Amino acid sequence: MSLRRDHVEADATATMSAPALSIQSAATFAPATRPGQPATISSSLGIANPGPAKPFVPFAPQHVSPQPVGNVVDDAFAGYHGYDVEPTGLFGKKKKGAAAAAPVKGAKKGGMMANLKTAKDKANAVVRNAASGAKALAKGATDLVSGLSRFDYKLYSEDFTAVLAVAKKANGTDLSDKNNYRAFEGDSAYKSVLKIAKMQEAKMTRTESLQKNVKGRASKVISRKIAGRNAACLGFAQVTESGESQERYGDVIFPPAAAAGIPTLVTLTENDTNGTAGMLPITGLVVEAIDVEGIAKGDDGKIAINMAEVKEVKISGGQSALTGDEFEFQWSLCVHGLHVDANKDLHAGPKILVPTGMTNNVSAYGIATDNGVERALSHAIKGEKIDLLMLWTAFKLVQGAQGLAYASLAPEQKKAAQELFGSLDGMNTQNSFSEDVDEDDFDELNAVPIM
């Protein structure tokens, strides 16, 4: 018999029942509540009440206190685009001090209308100041607009039409090479040509003169040759004596210290050279319309155009022949240099020809020769007839002077500028009635081109 069986048999007559839970045993499971203390779920389940949370955290708002912000007027004017206008005080705090907006008579201080009017008045003052500054720059504005700021020039419009340009004088009197161009400098497409131009300029020399005064002796001028070009020199070219140039421009042969803005043809001698025989320094450039009668023609009466290949800039060559009329449709202007010798006589250089519609392409410029027209760049690279400095300066002069057709000029001068430059960019002015009808009543009609 096992122990389990004995136990069952011994209690066989006993009644099976669940033990009763006494009040005392329940009390020991969970402490009783004090009198007057309300019963809670924790107390009923016998869970100790932990009490209030520690440490105590007072309530704090999620966002900070509102702060004043700017407004549209402040944002538009305060420190923006040069408008020195302080905040108006309409929505934000008004700045104190002298810069604060002044009160407007008849308006409530700090009111909307007062502050807006103050901002408007200050903005208007800025505009007025800018306008007065622009008016102060009106002198010489033609130079700036037309791109002639590196030249002293004169537009002839009475007996003939031409532009005479010389090196600009610094401070109105003295010549300075800071106003001179450097041949082909700044154009990445002509790097190889630029190297040749620097080699040509490295050979240039100029004459340095000094007056020597010693007590008891007669004053004398001493001189010597030094490296570098003269500030008046615009390039070198072969020249021939020109009575026409003497008649037209002989009155502007002055010492360099002539009045500001007046073209001054400076006298340079063979001491100012580039090392090539027959090439003389040019101190003036003339821009005028092409005279086709002065261009050499072949036996057939046509002008031969021979644009040689330029390997340095990979430009291929080409040949053609044009009648006089055909030529004038494709070539509009010419530029030639002036040289003043020791006797104050004027000499003119070969004509550099400007192609219509291609004023910005220096490689398309031509040069008049005994055989017709050839590529000016090819001659300039070889240093024949002209050098690279001469070609580049003439090229830059045409680009700048072209703006004269649109500048504010006197009526006669404007007519002359349009006569020279009007057809270069498609503004055809030569085909009009102005040749036949010159009465004032027909001015408007004269300006209408024939289509």
Image (cartoon, rainbow, N blue to C red):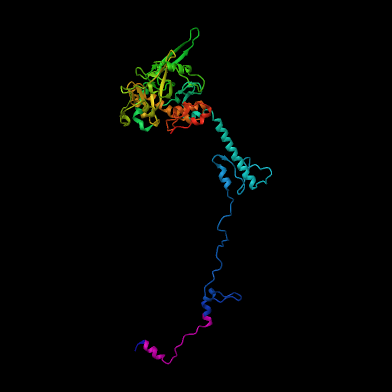
Q: Is residue 97 left or right of residue 253?
A: right
Q: Where is residue 45 in the image (x, y as percent from the top left)?
A: 52, 75
Picture coordinates of residue 377 (x, y %)? Answer: 35, 26
Q: Residue furthest top?
A: 216
Q: Residue 353 occupies which quadrant of the picture?
A: top left
| Nearer to me, 186 or 50 | 186
User: Which residue is drawn at the image coordinates 60% and 38% (left, top)?
Assistant: 125
Taking the magenta stretch, the answer to whether it contains residue 15 is yes
Q: Is residue 196 placed above or below 24 in the rendered structure?
A: above
Q: How many labels were placed on the picture?
A: 0
Q: Is residue 394 visible?
A: yes
Q: In this view, does 184 lie to the left or right of 92?
A: left
Residue at 59%, 39% in the rendered image? 124
Of residues 350 and 272, which is closer to you in this image?
350
| Residue 284 drawn in magenta | no
- Residue 187's x, y, as percent? 38, 31
In the orientation shown, which residue stands out farthest toward the right?
106
Q: Position of residue 218 (x, y in %)?
A: 48, 8
In terms of depth relative to the viewer, which is nearer, 427 or 279? 427
Q: In which quarter of the image is the N terminus?
A: bottom left
The C terminus lies in quadrant: top left
State the residue in front, 7 or 188: 188
Can you say whether 146 is above or below 50 in the image? above
Q: For residue 228, which quarter of the picture?
A: top left
Relative horizontal placement of residue 335, taking residue 38 as reference (left or right): left
Residue interval drawn in magenta: 4-25
Q: Quadrant of residue 103?
A: top right
Position of 269 with respect to 99 (left or right) is left
Residue furthest to the bottom: 13
